[in-house]
Amino acid sequence: MVFSYVAEDDPLDFNKAIAVGASLDIYVEEAGGTLLSKRPTITAADMSEPSFSVVSFADNRVTVRAEAEGKSDLEVSAKLPNGDEVADYVNLRSLPVTDVKLFHSCRAASELEGYYLSAQSGALWLGFELYATNQLGNAVPAIGYGYHPVGVEPEGAMQVDQEATTQQWIQFENLPSAPAAVTVSANVGTASLTLNFVDAADIVASRLVTYLGDGCWGDGEHNPCTLVGGNGAIFYLQPLLAGELPICQSALAFELETLTPTLCEVTSISAPDENNVNESGWLKVKGLAVGDCRFRVTFPTGNAGAGAATELQVEVKGGEDELP
């Protein structure tokens, strides 16, 4: 059988260390099978050593958990669609986490302070990476989900969702209902982030961040553009505090007015895919004619309730020298 799993780090290295305390979903397929016949149904799964345990298995997926540092064979038996029984194994290894990196979703990796809306329902995500130390003393990525070595101050200000299965984000729930400063710190290593929860009335403006272009040659978020007659470029909208400080993961309602309807169509859209849950306020700008597409975005509750309006611009291009 062929064994595989989903991980963001070093995709060509299968034998990455699984973080002690973390789980991992491993999938099996028939080696050399056809598209229709290669997916077996697992009938038994076990570990050869106590450093790992089998949490569950179903269909062609088995979930394992790293219980302690060590190595172990994952032994799997399965039935193919044609009724044949197959068995195989793969070696797994685990290491304890020795360092953690934390990131705000809408700020540079070096920024230790971020801004979020208080009194907002739903969840909040912080990016994180786990690292272990190998036999040579070098830091190496540690993979797996469900292990979140972080603490929150003040205690109880928000809670980690321990059931989340993403390996890229730590999900927090029960967020502050009023403006407050919350610190998230790693329990191993020295990583620490400050989350400043602010009121929607503090919003003074907004800006576009390019997410998915349509082939237009632009200059990132500083000179966004789209092509005439294309599918349109997709942006997400960031509310700004004084000093152009962005608010991450705002789900605040906004009003949209197109100022140049002959040049472009500007519409609000839902998140492009399920991986974009950590940012909201999505827009699509579709070019109709060459020129400067202008539109106004207003957060009605911004500017202390008077409304925070910003005129934004996306250049519509279409000349031969501007086409990809």
Image (spheres, rainbow, N blue to C red):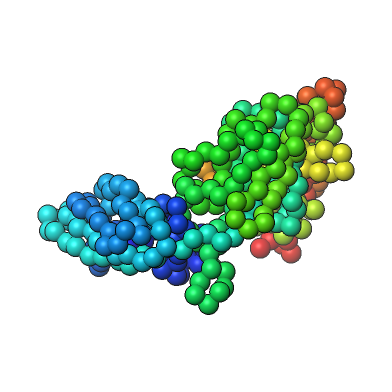
Q: Is residue 62 above or below residue 96?
A: above
Q: Which residue is drawn at 61% across and 28% down?
A: 121
Q: Residue at x 78, y 49 (%)?
A: 315
Q: Which residue is drawn at 53% across and 64% down?
A: 132
Does residue 246 appear to the left or right of 125 in the view shown? right
Residue 88 position within the rendered picture, expressed as x and y whole percent measured from the top left: 22, 65
Q: In this view, does 15 lie above or below 218?
A: below
Q: Can you name the residue that lies furthest to the bottom here?
A: 136
Residue 306 position within the rendered picture, expressed as x and y whole percent measured from the top left: 85, 22
Q: Can you name the residue that lies furthest to the right here?
A: 243
Q: In this view, does 279 lie above or below 83?
A: above
Q: Residue at x 71, y 30 (%)?
A: 118
Does residue 38 appear to the left or right of 112 in the view shown? left
Q: Nearer the viewer, residue 279 or 257?
A: 279
Query: Can residue 212 be seen?
Result: no
Q: Nearer the viewer, residue 73 or 200?
A: 73
Residue 275 position within the rendered picture, expressed as x and y whole percent measured from the top left: 54, 46
Query: Can residue 79 be seen?
Result: yes
Does residue 109 appear to the left or right of 158 in the view shown? right
Residue 230 position within the rendered picture, expressed as x and y whole percent measured from the top left: 63, 49
